[in-house]
């Protein structure tokens, strides 16, 4: 094979070749760089800048006509009792919701992995269904189920327990919403776990069986260690999602009763609704920092184990 | 790699400098638009673009036919916006500086839209504020005068189960005491569950607490400050919270309804009558529930002697960046006239904001609208400040604590006052 050259004998310098390929590369990445720059970077930078100003709804005609107030917005966000309550609720939701979601999803994935394909497909669809349903429609059904005379209390009543009015009792509302969120989210985690399980070579399990390991031993000594990267991925995905806890309280309780279900994202939303854009932006960056810190901790924790 | 990082940092720093250098609040705040007066009758020209809200476009086009005939050189373009997008659309238009000529807002949205600078102040000669309900004029008044025109108004009254009341030997309550007695009688009757369904603390209870405050003789603001920590507001909060504390008003989700007699009294608007008519026509209403079961009356009067009820409705303002303001004002001026206000009732069934048009025969001949026009004599608007939605949520938060008996009405009023003082009016 011959290579056609316009001027045989002259070889382009290495530097020129590199420049040319760099230029070609930039052309290829340009669509992403441009769209990310316009729709990603500019809003990102300006929202961060906004968090340090006193921008409000009345300023939208002259958005640059605002004062810098330093960390004042962050101080007012962090000292607001409603925001502190939201922080507590969000952390409670994450601390209870994430392990529960991951545990149930992992158990379901292991079970589905061990049954025949047709049965697995049926249940996989069933467990995944809540993920693709609309929260608004689902919320209506759950609200009816959680009513004083709803399905859940009827079942509890039949075994002699008088259930509370779940969503209007400040002691049970967050739990009720957490249960619903777990139900909504196990499907997505389960599918990822299932993929991870199918990636475990069957030889490893066979070897363990020959060595005389029972099912429990195989689960804890083979499955869990082999699944660590998948578990890390799922933990970070679910934690990030749960930190941004918004849909459920927004459509079910609007943060009530007595702020027992309000969340950071809901508080941020409210500040934007009131037109206090800069305070809302500050709240959003507090949430962003928290998500970042949690992800970092999880990476550190899992790194020793993967 | 190193060079790219340097470039990126330079770009970001440059961006930050650009942002920083442009900032700094000028001394006199946002400039207020001023605008020429309305065009002389018959002399409006150009295109007038209107954003109506919540399904008012079709009938506005019908109404405006006569105006278009009078003004042959003008054309009208009407687009309808859903209620919940009015503020967002106005925001986008204001930020961009391009939009329609006229924007319609709900009475409770108007202050926010005025606050963002979307409306021009109303020039002389568009309408005479004395011709309109004072509470409706309140809802279009900004920091220094009117910024829009009240188009139509709506108000609420008291619904009660007339059949159950008759059985118990009661008639429509006219005072707070009678209302409390009726709620107690409804709730404690054999088979009764609740007595009075009020908006729950999660359902913007300010819509009833503000009228209760007015009925007690109070006002939410004195023009300079919020006046929430007042004996009248405390009375209003305690009155509201009392129904929940006594278990006469449902605090959570319940299957008790007006039709099944579970909640035989509530405050709402005339649209509920259509809903009940539909339930009966479809046969989904409980047995024995007919239109004769539905009683309605003007609001009971409070300790302040008034029976003020919440006023709502639609307002129309001229967009501050409009390029055809004189024609827009001319259309609004025409629409404010008694004749057009009456024609609007015929078209859309909404009550005129112009007081003189309330005597229109079809309105007075219908017992429902007749009662409503009686109620309209005594109305109170939601406080017309951009920060109202935030104050309203504060009232929700603390009224819930009162309803659950966690704090007293007096403490709640103090807390709301303190937080409202730091928030201000939001202009």
Image: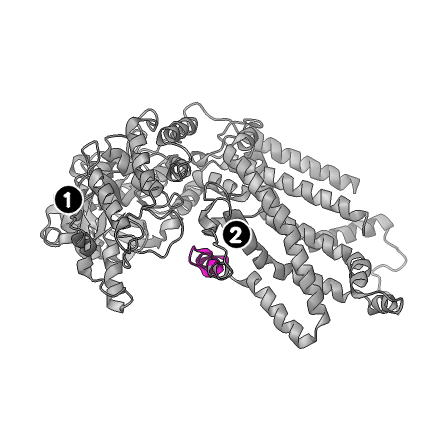
Q: Which residues are magenta?
A: A135-153
Residue drawn at 61 percent across, 51 percent down = A97
Main SS, magenta residues: helix
Q: Is the image coloured rainbow, by chain, by secondary structure, or in one colour?
A: one colour
Residue drawn at 79 percent across, 49 percent down = A19
**Front disc: 2 or 1:** 2
Residue B140: x and y in percent read 28, 37
In the rendered image of this protein, does residue B8 appear above or below residue B343? above
- Dot 2, crowdedness within 10 Å: few (<14), some or many (≥20)? some
Q: Is residue B236 left or right of residue A158?
A: left
Q: Is residue B383 left or right of residue A175?
A: left
Residue B98: x and y in percent read 40, 44
In the rendered image of this protein, does residue B180 appear above or below residue B47? above
Q: Quadrant of residue A218?
A: bottom right
The chain letter for the residue carrying disc 1 is: B
The chain letter for the residue carrying disc 2 is: A
Residue B363 visible in image: yes
In the rendered image of this protein, does residue A72 appear above or below residue B322? above
Q: Quadrant of residue A5?
A: bottom right
Determine whether the residue tagged by mark 2 lies in a helix, strand or loop: helix
Total marks placed: 2
Q: Is residue B101 magenta?
A: no
Q: Which mark is residue B374?
A: 1
Q: Which mark is residue A176?
A: 2
Identify which residue, B141 or B210, lies in the foreground: B210
Q: Is residue B323 left or right of residue A251?
A: left
Determine whether the residue tagged by mark 1 lies in a helix, strand or loop: helix
Identify which residue, B7 or A269, lies in the foreground: A269
């Amino acid at each position: 094979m011959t290579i056609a050259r316009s001027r045989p004998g002259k070889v382009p310098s290495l530097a020129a070749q590199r420049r040319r390929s760099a230029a070609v590369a930039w052309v290829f990445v340009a669509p992403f760089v441009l769209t990310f720059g316009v729709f990603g970077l500019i809003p990102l930078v300006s929202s961060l800048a906004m968090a340090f100003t006193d921008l409000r709804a009345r300023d939208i005609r002259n958005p640059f006509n605002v004062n810098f107030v330093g960390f004042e917005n962050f101080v007012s966000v962090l000292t607001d009792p409603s925001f502190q309550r939201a922080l507590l609720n969000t952390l409670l939701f994450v601390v209870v919701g994430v392990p529960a979601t991951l545990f149930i999803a992992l158990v379901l994935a292991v079970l589905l992995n061990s049954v025949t394909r047709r049965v697995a497909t049926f249940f996989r669809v069933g467990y995944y269904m809540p993920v693709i349903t609309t929260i608004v429609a689902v919320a209506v059904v759950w609200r009816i189920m959680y009513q004083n005379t709803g399905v859940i209390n009827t079942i509890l009543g039949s075994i002699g327990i008088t259930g509370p009015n779940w969503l209007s009792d400040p002691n049970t509302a967050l739990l009720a919403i957490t249960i619903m969120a777990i139900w909504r989210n196990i499907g997505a985690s389960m599918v990822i776990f299932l993929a991870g399980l199918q990636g475990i070579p069957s030889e490893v399990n066979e070897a363990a069986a020959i060595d005389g390991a029972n099912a429990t031993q195989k689960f804890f000594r083979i499955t869990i260690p082999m699944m660590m990267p998948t578990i890390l991925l799922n933990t970070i995905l679910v934690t990030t999602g749960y930190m941004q806890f918004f849909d459920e309280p927004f459509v079910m309780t609007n943060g009530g009763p007595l702020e027992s279900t309000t969340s950071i994202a809901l508080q941020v939303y409210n500040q934007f609704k009131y037109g206090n854009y800069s305070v809302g932006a500050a709240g959003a960056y507090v949430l962003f920092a928290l998500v970042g810190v949690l992800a970092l901790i999880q990476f550190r924790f899992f790194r020793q184990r993967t | 790699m190193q060079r790219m990082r340097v470039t990126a940092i330079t770009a970001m720093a440059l961006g930050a400098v650009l942002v920083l250098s442009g900032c700094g609040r000028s001394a006199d705040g946002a400039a207020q638009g001023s605008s020429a007066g309305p065009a002389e009758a018959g002399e409006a020209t150009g295109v007038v673009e209107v954003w109506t809200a919540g399904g008012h476009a079709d009938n506005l086009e019908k109404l405006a036919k006569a105006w278009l005939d009078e003004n042959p050189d003008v054309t009208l373009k009407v687009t309808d916006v859903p209620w919940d997008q009015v503020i967002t659309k106005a925001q986008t238009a204001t930020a961009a500086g391009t939009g329609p000529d006229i924007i319609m807002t709900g009475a409770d949205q108007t202050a926010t839209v005025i606050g963002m600078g979307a409306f021009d102040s109303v020039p002389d000669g568009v309408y005479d504020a004395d011709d309109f309900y004072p509470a409706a004029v309140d809802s279009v008044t900004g920091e220094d005068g009117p910024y829009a025109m009240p188009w139509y108004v709506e108000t609420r009254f008291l619904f009660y189960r007339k059949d159950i009341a008759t059985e118990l030997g009661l008639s429509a309550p006219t005072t707070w005491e009678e209302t409390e007695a009726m709620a107690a009688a409804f709730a404690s009757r054999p088979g009764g569950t609740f007595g009075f369904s009020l908006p729950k603390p999660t359902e913007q209870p300010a819509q009833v607490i503000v009228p209760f405050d007015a009925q007690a003789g109070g006002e939410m603001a004195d023009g300079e400050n919020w006046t929430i920590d007042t004996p009248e507001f405390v009375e209003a909060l305690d009155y509201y919270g009392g129904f929940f504390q006594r278990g006469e008003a449902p605090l959570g989700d319940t299957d008790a309804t007006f039709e099944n007699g579970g909640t035989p009294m509530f405050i709402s608007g005339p649209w509920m009558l259509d809903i009940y008519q539909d339930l009966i026509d479809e046969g989904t209403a409980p047995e024995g529930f007919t239109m004769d079961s539905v009683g309605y009356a003007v609001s009971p009067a409070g300790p302040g002697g008034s029976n003020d009820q919440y006023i709502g409705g639609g307002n129309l303002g001229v967009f501050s960046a409009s390029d055809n303001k004189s024609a827009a004002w001319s259309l609004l001026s025409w629409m404010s006239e008694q004749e057009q206000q009456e024609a609007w009732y015929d078209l859309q069934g909404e009550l005129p904001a112009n007081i003189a048009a309330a005597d229109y025969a079809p309105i007075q001949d219908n017992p429902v609208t007749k009662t409503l026009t009686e109620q309209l004599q005594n109305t109170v608007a939601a406080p017309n400040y951009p920060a109202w939605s935030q104050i309203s949520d504060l009232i929700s938060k603390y009224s819930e604590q009162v309803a659950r008996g966690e704090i007293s009405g007096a403490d709640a009023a103090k807390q709301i006052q303190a937080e409202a003082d730091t928030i201000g009016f939001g202009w």
